[in-house]
Amino acid sequence: MIGPLRAALLGHPVDHSLSPVLHGAAGAAVRVAVDYTLVDVLPGHFDEALAACRRDDRHCLNVTAPHKRSAWRACATRLTPAAERTGAVNTLWWADDGWAGDNTDVEGFAALLGAATPGHAVLVGAGGAARAVLDVLGARGVARVDVVNRRPERARELLEGVGRDPAHAHGLGDLATLQPSADLVVWALPPGAWSGEAAVDWRTCPPGCRVLHLAYGAPAATLLSAARAAGLVAEDGLVMLAAQGLAAFARWTGLRPPGAPVVAALREAVGGAPRAD
Ligand SMILES: NC(=O)c1ccc[n+]([C@@H]2O[C@H](COP(=O)([O-])OP(=O)(O)OC[C@H]3O[C@@H](n4cnc5c(N)ncnc54)[C@H](OP(=O)(O)O)[C@@H]3O)[C@@H](O)[C@H]2O)c1
């Protein structure tokens, strides 16, 4: 064993996080001891939490909502291309003279999407994760992407930021009118955030439409079951979680652990067997 790798997740809330399981399994696979801690950081307190990590010699950090923009700012010029493009950072490391940052959600969503290139994608949500989704859909050359969001102006900003037509920004109420032509729906809202979630009629999506929920475990289960009951292919975000975490681990250590034991450890932690559909 080498290490320990001193790492932490900064976010609010963080008590539900599977990152300790993820990085524990990743470390075990390549014989690196991992000392991973969860740090609950209230909005407005990110910079002081970062300074405390530095003092504590904790130089390998993950960042989750609501701090990905603050993490991006903290890295100033030491950003990977993915972090620059998306304006969000979920992975930090100390690089001699300051914090450097990457957005490994991009690699994570690319792994979840697989080799597919949908013709018409509908993205539900315009928060931090939606930035990574939009980046990947753009790189894949997806012809049409509509973004629906509680505040359509945030969807518009997101589309404009990547040079897409802002006319494809909508309120959540427009989801029903977009579903019939969609061959991919990406659900990037925190589970339960939108009270209209349960009323979505998945039968209006065409056969073969794929539904990707970025969340996983019990909070994602109801929506995924409803989509499967309508005959759609529906998957949770566990593969994305594993892939973004493994990419972070590689940034920190230069080592890339195998994915299978990490996904298996995460599946066990959420108490669910993988589904073929
Ligand atoms: N699998 C993975 O590796 C992975 C990675 C990243 C994220 N995720 C998951 O993806 C989901 C989104 O994450 P995120 O970081 O993008 O979160 P976030 O930035 O907090 O998401 C904000 C989104 O939620 C919407 N929202 C908040 N409250 C709402 C309400 N009451 N009604 C309707 N919409 C509401 C916001 O709309 P407004 O813009 O109108 O406020 C915005 O679209 C989470 O479940 C997260 O766990 C998974």
Image (cartoon, helix red, strand yellow):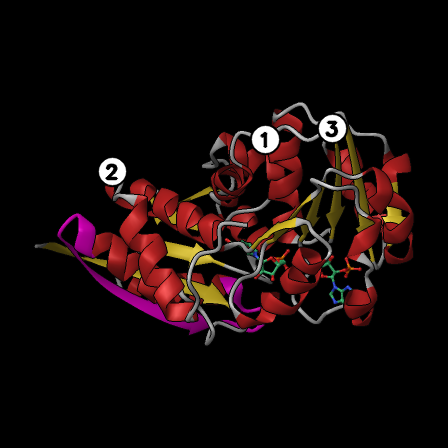
**Residue 96 visible here:** no
**Residue type indicated by callout 2:** Gly
Q: How many marks?
A: 3
135 left or right, relative to 39: right
Identify the mark at residue 254; answer none if there is no mark: 2
* Disc 2 versus disc 3: nearer the observer: 3
What is the span of residues highlighted in magenta in the rendered image?
28-46
Q: Is residue 209 magenta?
A: no
User: Which label sits on residue 119?
Assistant: 3
- Which label belongs to residue 116? 1
Residue type pointed to by label 3: Gly
Ligand 1 sits in quadrant: bottom right
C-alpha span from label 2 to label 1: 29 Å
The image shows residue 76, relative to residue 201, as above or below, that is: above
Labelled pair 1, 3 in contact (Cβ < 8 Å): no
Eye-nearest disc, 2 or 1 = 1
Q: Which residue is painted at 31% across and 48% down in the image?
A: 260
